[in-house]
């Protein structure tokens, strides 16, 4: 099922590395291990890595900073591994480009399920692009090119979106004028997220509204339906990218 997917575990705890390697190999994964940022970069240069399991607490450069570095040049899926219960770290990890996270202590089987889920989504993005993936999507004078993640305001100003904000906006654009619960947006935007999942959606919606405020009616395009979720009110049009 995993077609020998290559997984890089970035963690300075040798016991955890050994445990995860022993557990993941029978599921068909090829495991590589790095104990810090320098080791991670060496592994990425030498191996064709399909997914990274990234611990937040690392010697030297922490996992959040390393995730940001990876995202500057690669779309390799990343699952954050953290012993922290701080919701801010989890939300920040998703904001800077992580695809999912899991909190220590955890059941190894849960990590397997998370890895399989994230890899499936990554392969779907490659093999069957989402509606509009190769098109420009227009709404209320805005233009989103999903191929390069560029968003142009009606004024012509380019608005920079984080990976999580881009995924959230795409979720709204693919389901215009449909009421979406927070748990639906979690699945559409970045897969299953437990614990702080709904709070992360509220934060992402707030940040997306702030960026859409480049135009007068921008923030109003995302309506809050109290007790239910969110509604994207703008008309959406697809056009071929140029």
Image: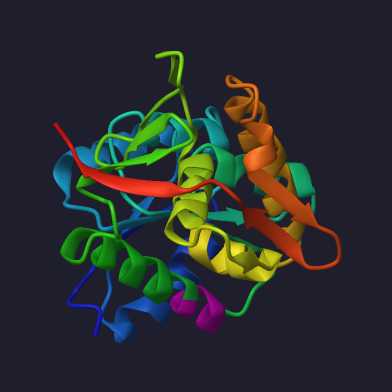
* Boundaries of the magenta span: 108-113
Is residue 23 highlighted in magenta? no
- Up-down: is 97 above or below 172? above
Q: Is residue 6 visible?
A: no
Camera-nearest residue between 72 and 200: 200
Identify the residue at horizontal 53%, vertical 41% (top origin).
165
Image position, residue 136 (x, y; %): 27, 40
- Up-down: is 103 above or below 146? below
Classified by dominant secondary structure, the portion drawn in magenta counts as helix
Q: Is residue 228 visible?
A: yes
Residue 8 as seen in the image, left or right of residue 197: left
Image position, residue 85 (x, y; %): 79, 54
Camera-nearest residue between 139 and 72: 139
Residue 43 as seen in the image, left or right of residue 166: left
The quarter of the picture where the N terminus appears is: bottom left
Image position, residue 182 (x, y; %): 69, 64
Identify the residue at horizontal 86%, vertical 66% (top origin).
227
Image position, residue 30 (x, y; %): 24, 69
Quadrant of residue 4 within the rendered picture: bottom left
């Amino acid at each position: 099922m995993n077609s020998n997917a290559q997984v890089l575990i970035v963690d300075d705890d040798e016991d955890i590395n050994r445990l995860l390697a022993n557990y993941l190999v029978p599921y068909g994964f090829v495991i590589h291990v790095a104990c810090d940022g320098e080791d991670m970069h060496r592994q990425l240069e030498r191996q064709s890595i399909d997914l990274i399991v990234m611990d937040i607490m690392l010697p030297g450069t922490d996992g959040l900073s390393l995730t940001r570095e990876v995202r500057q040049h690669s779309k390799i899926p990343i699952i954050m591994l953290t012993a922290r219960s701080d919701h801010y770290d989890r939300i920040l990890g998703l904001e800077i480009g992580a695809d999912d996270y899991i909190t220590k202590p955890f059941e190894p089987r849960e990590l397997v399920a998370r890895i399989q889920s994230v890899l499936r989504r990554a392969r779907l993005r490659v093999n069957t692009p989402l509606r509009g993936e190769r098109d420009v999507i227009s709404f209320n004078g805005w233009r989103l090119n999903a191929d390069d993640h560029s968003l142009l305001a009606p004024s012509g100003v380019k608005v920079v979106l984080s990976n999580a904000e881009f995924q959230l906006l795409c979720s709204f654009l693919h389901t215009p004028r449909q009421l979406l619960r927070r748990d639906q947006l979690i699945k559409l935007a970045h897969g299953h997220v437990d614990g702080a999942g709904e709070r992360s959606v509220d934060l992402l919606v707030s940040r997306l509204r702030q960026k859409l405020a480049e135009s007068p009616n921008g923030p109003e395009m995302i309506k809050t339906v109290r007790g239910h979720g969110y509604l994207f009110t703008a008309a959406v049009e697809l056009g071929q990218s140029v």
